[in-house]
Image (cartoon, rainbow, N blue to C red):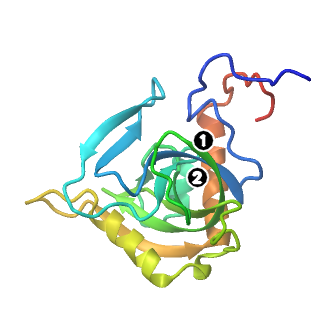
């Protein structure tokens, strides 16, 4: 039996994992937050480990798995797809993934089919949230566009992101500007891949091969 090829060290989830098996339609998602979390976790950009960003101030929790697409970056090209934005947020592209079976742990990687997204502004910066479904999911795998999901589910996602940064006595830093379908979402993913390649033109070598 041939030995399995493997990473000798844990790869950085943003820079060391691949974008996905068939981007921009099927991508990898690194999960930071599950629908069970009352604390917002975020990957540390230097170490690659999750760190506590903040406890959620409201009672709402994300209705889907929430994380990012490896080797993507929200920068100039992503900002041009959001006309009201003055810039982009400089983070990996966020992704929300729907799964019929509960996935209750973070720091997992899964294959996700991109079907739409939310155009968001966070303090004037483009902060899109790609919406996807788990590949081979028993219920949602047939979804190909945002219209294949129940409208109430999208409403819950909009409500979560409209409120997840609310601070008592302060204004509303986040606004959900639009809901879009698979074609627009694919363009956002492509723009984020291009933004990443411009800022990080020589990624670390991948011992398993591939980009």
Q: Which residue is mark 2?
A: 77
> Residue 68: x percent and y percent?
52, 47
User: Helix or strand or loop: what does disc 2 sit on?
Assistant: helix
Q: Earlier in the sequence, mark 1 or mark 2?
A: 1
- Mark 1 surroundings: few (<14), some (14-19) or many (≥20) residues within 10 A: many
Seen in the picture, residue 40 relative to 205 is either above or below; the reply is below
> Residue 25: x percent and y percent?
71, 60
Residue nearer the viewer, 77 or 189: 189
x 68%, y 68%: residue: 141
Residue nearer the viewer, 85 or 204: 204
x 62%, y 39%: residue: 71
| Residue extending farthest left | 169
Seen in the picture, residue 121 relative to 32 is either above or below; the reply is below
Residue nearer the viewer, 202 or 207: 207
- Mark 2 surroundings: few (<14), some (14-19) or many (≥20) residues within 10 A: many
x 26%, y 59%: residue: 173
Mark whose residue sits in front, 1 or 2: 1
| Residue extending farthest right | 1
x 46%, y 53%: residue: 66
Q: Marks 1 and 2, how far apart in space? A: 17 Å
Quadrant position of the N terminus in the picture: top right
> Residue 164: x percent and y percent?
28, 59
Q: Find residue 70 and name its label.
A: 1
Pointers 1 and 2 in contact (C-beta within 8 Å) = no
């Amino acid at each position: 039996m041939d030995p399995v090829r493997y990473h000798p060290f844990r790869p950085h989830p943003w820079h060391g994992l691949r974008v996905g098996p068939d981007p921009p339609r099927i991508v990898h998602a690194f999960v930071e937050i599950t629908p069970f979390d009352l604390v917002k976790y975020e990957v540390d950009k230097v170490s690659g480990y999750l760190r506590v960003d903040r406890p959620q101030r409201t009672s709402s929790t994300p209705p889907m798995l929430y994380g990012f697409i490896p080797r993507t970056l929200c920068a100039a090209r992503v900002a041009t797809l959001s006309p009201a934005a003055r810039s982009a947020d400089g983070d990996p592209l966020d992704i929300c993934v729907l799964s019929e079976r509960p996935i209750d742990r973070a720091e997992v990687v899964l294959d996700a089919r991109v079907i739409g997204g939310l155009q968001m502004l966070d303090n004037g910066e483009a902060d899109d949230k790609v919406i996807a479904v788990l590949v081979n999911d028993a219920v949602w795998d047939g979804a190909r566009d945002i219209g294949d999901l129940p409208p109430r589910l999208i409403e819950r996602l909009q409500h979560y992101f409209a409120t997840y940064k609310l601070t008592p006595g302060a204004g509303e830093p986040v606004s959900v500007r639009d809901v879009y379908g698979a074609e627009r979402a694919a363009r956002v993913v492509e723009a984020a891949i291009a933004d990443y390649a411009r800022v990080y033109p020589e990624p670390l070598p991948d011992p398993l091969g591939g980009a």
